[in-house]
Image (cartoon, rainbow, N blue to C red):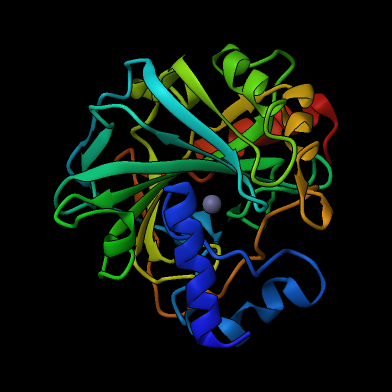
Amino acid sequence: MTAGAVFFVCVFVEILQNYGTICQDFGYDGTEGPNYWGAKYAQCVGKHQSPIDIEVTKAITKHFPPLVFSHFDEPIQKAFLINNGHTVQMKINSDPKPTIKGGPLSGEFEFAQLHYHWGQNDTVGSESQFDHHTYPGEMHIVFFDKRYKDFTEAGNKPSGLTVLAFIIIIDEHDNLGYDNFEDGLKDVIDESANRTFNNLDSLSDLTRPEGERSFYYTYEGSLTTPPCSEVVTWIEFTNPLPMSREQINAFRKLFSKNGPLTHNYRPIQPLNDRIVYFNGADSKLPMSHLTTVLIIVACVYNIF
Ligand SMILES: [Zn+2]
């Protein structure tokens, strides 16, 4: 496919579905897989790509200003859920949109969309790794710098986007914040299937309460899907998002045009000359809160 044709597909999908530029000609297997993305999307072989393996002991502790979350605790009045063939993505079609500022960010960023990554089984699925460990899934909430018109424009600007990331771990109980969302997943099994919600649970319900969103790792990286734009300030929280096995399984029941969408995580990319910062306690713990929690959970549920 020529570059012009690729551009057409991306833009056409954007106009049709109104949820930000996506590109339809990539996948996670064979010649559509991550090793081939660079042939069509030059930035995918850049030097500042995501995801990465965060080596906890090498992260530099830094005291950033507090993150300021707005409209995270309010139910989402109108939500739009779609299976885009790569993941399930949620947009908000009501105002005001949630925003975030502070921390490593300069300026205020507005919610664009959220989506998930998962794997064939409970030992894989997260894109980020922590000390070489992978986890059953990962949630990404994408925001764009409000100095720009929208996600598409900000996606071409340095540091134009930020992604809040939560590792997903298995819990004995259902995550009640996901009751409605999981119900919606049943309506978007096939690629391009979509549905709307009135009064979906708040972003805090879908993630962690605000008091549990102060410890995080941050670094400069990229989108983890084509066009892999290197414009993303990553904020990766140490407190994971718990879900039951059944809830994680519901993601694996979605389909892409090639069949069951059993996995959609990109392999880790080289850190190269980047620094990962840790925003947290004065004296860095020998093991991160995340790692501690995850090892306990893994032992309890026999993941390893
Ligand atoms: Zn993602």
**Image point 25% across, 36% down: which residue?**
99
Q: In this view, does 148 lie above or below 72?
A: below
Residue 235 in percent (x, y) is at 38, 48
Q: Quarter holding the C terminus? A: top right
187 or 272, nearer to the observer: 187
Depth order, front residue of 69/39? 39
Residue 89 image point, x, y percent: 54, 41
Q: In this view, does 200 lie above or below 215?
A: above
In percent of the image, x 66 and y 41: which residue is there? 137
Quarter of the image where one finds residue 218 = bottom left
> Where's residue 66, x and y in %?
20, 36
Where is residue 274 drawn, in percent x and y? 39, 73
Q: Residue at x 17, y 42 (%)?
A: 65
Residue at 79 percent across and 31 percent down: it is 249
Residue 223 in sight here:
no
Question: In this picture, is 178 found above or below 213?
Answer: above
Q: Quadrant of residue 1?
A: bottom right
Q: In this view, does 213 lie to the left or right of 23?
A: left
- Residue 72 visible in the current orientation: yes
Q: How many marks?
A: 0
> Quadrant location of residue 72?
top left
In this rendering, the answer to whether 205 lies above or below 109 is above
